[in-house]
Image: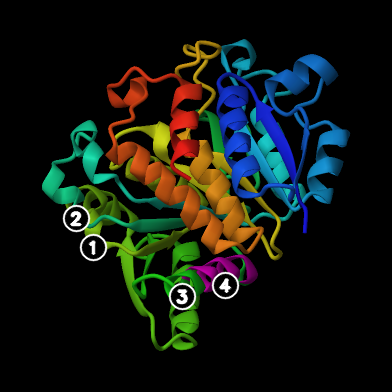
Amino acid sequence: MTARIALLPGDGIGPEVVAEAVRILEVVLPGGLAVSEHAIGGCAIDAEGTALPASTLAACAAADAVLLGAVGGPKWDDPAAKVRPEQGLLGLRKALGLWANLRPVRPFPELAEASPIKADRLAGVDLLVIRELTGGLYFGERGRSRGDDGERAFDTLIYSEVEVRRVVRLAFQLAQGRRGRVTSVDKANVLESSRLWRQIAVEVAGQHPGIELEHQLVDSCAMRLISAPASFDVIVTENMFGDILTDEAAVLSGSLGLLPSASLGDGPRGLYEPIHGSAPDIAGKGVANPIGTILSAAMLCRHSLRDDATARRIESAVARAISDGCRTRDLGGAMSTSAMGAAIRERL
């Protein structure tokens, strides 16, 4: 069976790192890969005046999976602009019905010194953060008004039972293949939306008696992510909390260039991308770390192609490259983007 992959290299270092991930997929899926490349983000704005061209959306909807590099950069950073690169990514997630973002964090022992966290705190860290993507503060009603005390602004945090239940259920399903623990993160001591979230988490837990559920307030969770990260297995939380906590968790690995992500919905089709940005300061220099994108390709194999063996093969090759001393500039080494990609391919 041929895997149809829509490539969205995007802006900045996106094209460089996506190219290395594709070379990996060509090795592990010989004769079973059909790729097509399309524009998104800033480059799409420049070419077509929109961050998500209709042709790009159509190609993604017809693909088995989407592999994205990065969007944005200083050229398109005007906050007052009507069209911004990030609109392409948000629009794509919405159009494809992707409501859960998965970010695994598993630091490499050989890179412990690259993290600002003490090495003993990193021992045994293997966690998965699941962030709800389509509800919450980012999608509620918002606006501005003027009163006696000057200008006012508001953003509305709304969640429905359906939105909460499906992402919490996914967390429990994924925990079954891991260490069997789910940490549901909320702010139930203050927010009514969090009280609904906690209520549903308890209901879903009742349907999964083999999985342990714990509740954690988001502020104490932020502290625990640094003080005791190995105590987590699967973390599930709402949109804004997840946005903040996943960036915090990224520091455990020592480099943003190492971490992958997957955005999933009801079916096997997903959107896969490294968590780093477009890094315009190093774009075109051939020094970007491709590992986050290569590991995103491994997640693509696991979740969209239902091929866990191939995903593990890629992840093992990355681990061996790191163990053998392969390092890009962000890890204190001097290997180029293409050299790191070649080193990983050699170990497949």
- As measured in the structure, the alpha-carbon distance from the residue carrying label 1 to the one carrying label 4 is 24 Å
Disc on the earlier residue, 2 or 3: 3
Give the main secondary structure of the magenta stretch: helix
Q: Residue at x 63, y 24 (%)?
A: 15
User: Residue placed at 61% from the left, 43% from the top?
Assistant: 27
Mark nearer the viewer, 2 or 3 = 2
Which disc is residue 201 wearing? 3
Callout 4–callout 2 Cβ contact below 8 Å: no
Residues in magenta, as a range: 162-171
Q: Where is residue 34 drawn, in percent x and y?
A: 78, 43
**What numbered label is drawn on residue 231?**
1
Label 2 is placed on what type of residue?
Ala
Q: Quadrant of residue 232?
A: bottom left
For marks 2 and 3, give the CA distance. Answer: 23 Å
Mark 3 crowdedness (10 Å alpha carbons): few <14, some 14-19, many ≥20: many
Q: Residue at x 44, y 76 (%)?
A: 176
Identify the residue position indicated by label 2 in the image.
Answer: 228
Q: Are marks 1 and 4 in contact (CB under 8 Å)?
A: no
Spatial CA distance of label 4 from label 3 is 7 Å
Amino acid residing under circle 1: Ser
Query: Label 2 to label 1, Cα distance in Å?
Result: 6 Å
**In this rendering, the label closer to the viewer, 1 or 3:** 1
- Residue highlighted by disc 4: 165
Q: Give the class, few, some or many, for how many residues have Cα within 10 Å of label 4's Cα (few <14, many ≥20).
A: some
Give the amino acid type for the residue marked by disc 4 in the picture. Answer: Arg
Mark 1 touches mark 3? (CB < 8 Å)? no
Residue type pointed to by label 3: Ala
Contact? badges 2 and 1 (CB < 8 Å): yes
Of the numbered discs 4 and 3, the one sitting upstream in the chain is 4
Q: Indicate whether 243 appears above or below 235.
A: above
In this view, the residue in front, 291 or 96, is 291
